[in-house]
Structures are given as C-alpha cells and as structure tokens.
C-alpha cells in the first residue's frame, strides 16, 4: 500500500467508530423524545401516569438526552480534531463502551428500582427519597453516572494530551501566543482545535467536580450518617451539570466551522476577535454556573452578581463570531444547499434565538419569578433541540456525503421540515407555559396549564418522525460506507 492509501484506509476505519457514536446518540435521542411526549401527554391530562412514573420518565429523559447528545457531539469533535492532531482510537472505543455500560445501569436503576431524582441528583435527594426508591436504585444511577463520567474524562485527557503535543500547551491551543503578539494570526490553530481546547478545559473541570459530588452522594447513600455541606454539594453539582450540558454545543459547532467553508468554497480564517471570543467563553462557562444558585441567598453576594452579569455574556462572544462568520462565508457564495448545509444553518438560527430567553431568565428580578417555570425548559429545548442536536444531524448528513454515495432524498427534505417546525413548536409551547406561570417538573397540571402541553405532545410526534428519517438515512450510509463519496473530503480549505 502506498502511504496515501494506507492513510485513507486508517481514515475509513475511524469513520466506522465515529458513525457508531452518532448512531448511538441518534437512536437514544429519538427514544428519549418518546418519554418527552409521554410526559407532555400526562401534563396535558390525556394520559394518567402515576407521579412516580412521571418522575422516572423525567429522570431518564434528562439524563438520556444530555448523555446522548454529549456522546454524539464528542464523536463529531473527535472526527474533526483527529484531522489535525493524533488521537487515541483505543480511548475513543473505551468511552463508547463505558457509555453503554452506564446507560444500562441508569436504565435498570430507574425502571427496575424506581430511581427518580431527575438528572441533577441534588444532594441529599438520592438518599432521602421518602421511600420512593431504595439504596440499589440510587447506587445504580450514581455509579452509572460515575462510569459515564470516567469515559468522558479519559477522552478529554487524550484530546488534551494530543493538543499539547502538537501545539505546546492548552493556552496555545486557544491561541494565546497570538493574542500576546508572539505569533502571527495567520499561524493560528484551526477552529476545530480552538473549540476542542475550550471543551477539553471546561469539561475536564466539570467532570472532576461531578465525580467528587457523585462519590460523596454514593457514600451518603450507603451510610446516611456520612453527611456533607448541601451548599457545597449544590455548587459542585451545577459546576458539573451546567458546564457539561453547555459544552455539547461547543463541540457540535465544529461541524459548522468545517462544513460551511467547504460548501461555500471559501476560506473562513481565524481572527483575533475569534480567539478572544473563545477565551471569554472558556472562562464564562466555568464561572456562571452560579446562575443556578440565585435562589440561595446564603451564597456570597459577589458570586451571584458575577453569575448574573457573566451569564449575559456567556455564550455571546462565540455565538456572535460564529453567526457573523457563517453569514460572511455564505453571503453571495453560490453555496449549494443540501441536507447537511441546511441543517447547519438551522442550527445557527436555533442557537441564536434559543439564547434570548436564557438571557432574560438570567436577570435576577426575572429569575425570581421565572426560574422554576417551564420558561427554563423552553430556552434549553430551543438551543439544544433546534441548535446543538441539529448540528449533530448536520454532521450525520455530512459524513454520509463525504464517505458514501448515498444521496439525500425527498423524504429527507420532509424530515427536515417536520423536525424544524416540530422542535420549534415544542420550545414555544414550553415558553408559553412559562409565561403563564406553569411550574417546571410538575407531574400534574391545572386545567388552565394543559393546552400548551397537549399541543407540545402532538408536535413531539413529528419531531420523532423527523429524527427517525435522519437516523434511517444514516443507517443507509453505514451500510454503504466507503463507497467513493464526494470529492469534498480531499478538498483542503482553511
Ligand atoms: C420530542 C421532543 C421533546 C419533547 C416532547 C420533550 C419534552 C420534555 C418535557 C415534557 C420535559 C419536562 C418539562 C417539565 O419540567 O415539566 C422535558 C425536560 C427536559 N428535556 Fe426534553 N423534550 C424533547 C426533546 C429534548 C431534547 C432534544 C433535549 C436535549 C438534547 C431535551 C432535554 C431535556 C432536559 C435536559 C430536560 C430537563 C429534565 C429535568 O428537569 O430534570 N429534550 N422535556
Ligand atoms: Cu446554567
């Protein structure tokens, strides 16, 4: 084999693993949507689930969605980052294996042992459930989460190692030597590397915080006389949950960076502003979890003020440079629209409008009224459902295009409109519920709160249909992997 062919062969075997990540993610997301619909049917008064069942569904839905989206996003990031640095295939496989073990433990804990603390497992709820669940359910869930975290931690240690090896340090991966004038901006790391560096930094921190609080919870469940400071526990829990959930979109956005320049046949260079934006978001993402503590008046006041002020600024720098860059790259480029590029564009739209309700909610005055209403799921279903998850779907179509001869069909187009309209409707339905003061995480609603939930349940069916169409296209790709594909793959553009 010539060197070229050997390289190509290695590439293709990597694609197989990446596809396994995306397929697992896509299937779990589709399945979790079904639990979302069941919850809405119950809240809408159409189904009559026991409260215990509702909270089990809430727990599996939240855990499953965040876990699956993070897994698929990690696969996406690994695919692109691997084109610039040398990553370990073994660790990539291990993360998937640990993920699957974790999923089984969590599912058994929830459905066989009735564990239902929601995915936030806020201390001391895992141990103090008023007998709603026992020790075994709690242990299965908590240890499962620990196993999941371990897999991701291994993965980020490897991405960190690989970035340091190639670029010298993580700060250089973020382009600090350019910001400090030691290097020209034309020698900046590629955008995929910058984003991966950010995620490596924030998620390593998040997972370590999460592991500490999980272990403390586990000890507390086994031996309730071991207790710890609930405020510290809450801080650690949200330092994990907020950051880990947020990092999904920072991994997924890499597809937008890599895809649009190729499609528009135009370079999308790194600017100093771009570097500043990613550094800001790295820092903000780590410190603003305190916006989950605005209802805890015992927190140091400066932390809450910081949490509020920086929450306004959190995603904005990266969002602005990305949205603006995306518009500039595409503007008058004669770009060819297909499923992948269409989804990439939709995801930018979902991200932009999904951030607006979050900014409103991050205001303390509004937060006191809105925080425990469905306004909050309204914001994150928009930016996750119409933003981050759509980036994952975009990548699935992209991979199918560059690595097979499977074509987009009319059905895929129908799936696109089905999904876009449905997921948008679901988000709006939550926001309307929030605006009429419907509390979040309530199994049962008053009749005047039921309308939006019923509407959302119907929309949910179309979201599932859209997702199924995307996944079926992807399975068709997996069966035809390596059949030529388009020449897009070889095209090198910044
Ligand atoms: C068909 C699509 C979907 C439907 C019908 C749906 C429905 C729901 C419902 C009814 C809730 C509970 C709301 C409440 O607090 O009363 C919820 C919570 C949640 N959903 Fe979804 N959802 C969908 C898609 C998604 C997606 C795509 C994601 C993320 C990738 C997601 C992530 C979450 C999370 C993290 C929670 C919070 C769970 C908690 O409060 O502990 N959902 N969803
Ligand atoms: Cu948050």
Image (cartoon, grey):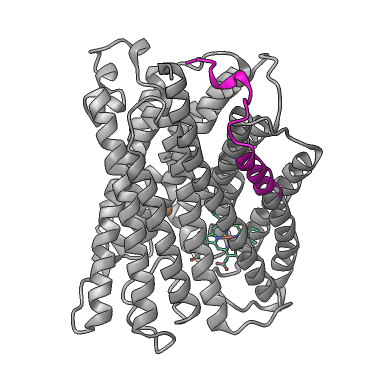
Please, is residue 257 above or below residue 17 in the view?
Answer: above
How far from the left and from the top, in percent, is residue 423?
Answer: 67, 51
Q: Quadrant of residue 140?
A: bottom left
Residue closest to the far bottom = 131
Q: Quadrant of residue 227?
A: bottom left
How far from the left and from the top, in percent, is residue 93?
Answer: 39, 47
Residue 306 at least partly seen = no
Task: For the N terminus, give its image quadrant.
Answer: top left
Residue closest to the far left = 226
Q: Residue at x 55, y 72 (%)?
A: 57
Is 74 placed left or right of 25 in the picture? left
How far from the left and from the top, in percent, is residue 220?
Answer: 24, 78
Q: Which residues are magenta?
A: 469-494
Q: Residue at x 31, y 27 (%)?
A: 174
Please, is residue 460 above or below residue 348 in the view?
Answer: below
Residue closest to the far front = 1
């Amino acid at each position: 084999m010539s060197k070229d062919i050997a390289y190509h062969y290695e590439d293709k075997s990597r694609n197989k693993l990446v596809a396994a990540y995306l397929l697992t993610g896509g299937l779990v997301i589709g399945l979790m949507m079904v639990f979302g619909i069941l919850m809405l049917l119950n809240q809408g008064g159409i189904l009559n689930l026991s409260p215990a069942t509702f909270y089990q569904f809430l727990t599996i839905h939240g855990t499953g969605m965040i876990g699956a989206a993070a897994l698929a996003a990690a696969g996406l990031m690994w695919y692109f980052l691997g084109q610039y640095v040398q990553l370990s295939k073994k660790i990539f496989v291990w993360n998937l294996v640990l993920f699957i073990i974790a999923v089984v433990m969590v599912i058994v804990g929830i459905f066989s042992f009735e564990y239902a603390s929601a995915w936030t497992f806020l201390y001391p709820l895992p141990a103090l459930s008023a007998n709603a669940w026992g020790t075994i359910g709690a242990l299965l869930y908590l240890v499962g989460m620990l196993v999941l975290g371990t897999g991701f931690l291994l993965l980020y240690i490897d991405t960190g190692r690989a970035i340091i090896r190639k670029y010298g340090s993580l700060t250089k991966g973020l382009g600090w030597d350019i910001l400090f004038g030691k290097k020209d901006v034309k020698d900046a790391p590629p955008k995929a590397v910058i984003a991966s560096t950010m995620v490596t930094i924030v998620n390593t921190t998040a997972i370590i915080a999460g592991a500490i609080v999980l272990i403390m919870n586990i000890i507390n469940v086994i031996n309730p006389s071991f207790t710890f400071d609930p405020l510290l526990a809450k801080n650690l829990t949200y330092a994990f949950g907020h950051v880990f959930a947020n990092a999904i979109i920072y991994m997924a956005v890499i597809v937008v960076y890599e895809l649009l320049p190729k499609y528009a046949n135009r370079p999308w260079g790194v600017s100093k502003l771009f570097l500043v934006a990613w550094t800001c978001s790295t820092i903000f993402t780590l410190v603003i979890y305190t916006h989950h503590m605005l209802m805890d008046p015992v927190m140091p006041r400066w932390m809450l003020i910081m949490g509020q002020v920086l929450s306004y600024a959190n995603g904005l720098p990266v969002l602005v440079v990305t949205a603006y860059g995306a518009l500039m790259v595409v503007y008058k480029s004669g770009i060819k629209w297909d499923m992948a590029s269409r989804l990439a564009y939709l995801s930018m739209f979902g991200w932009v409008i999904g951030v607006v309700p979050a900014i409103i909610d991050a205001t303390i005055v509004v937060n006191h009224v809105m925080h425990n209403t469905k306004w909050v799921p309204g914001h994150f279903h928009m930016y996750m459902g119409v933003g981050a998850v759509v980036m994952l779907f975009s990548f699935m179509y992209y991979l199918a295009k560059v690595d097979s001869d499977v074509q987009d069909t009319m059905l895929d187009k129908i799936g696109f409109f089905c999904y876009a309209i449905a997921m948008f409707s679901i988000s709006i339905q939550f926001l309307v519920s929030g605006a009429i003061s419907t509390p979040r995480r309530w199994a049962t609603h008053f009749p005047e709160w039921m309308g939006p939930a019923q509407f959302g349940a119907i929309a949910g069916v179309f979201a599932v249909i859209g997702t199924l169409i995307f996944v079926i296209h992807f399975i068709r790709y997996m069966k035809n992997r390596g059949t030529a594909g388009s020449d897009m793959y070889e095209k090198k553009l910044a």
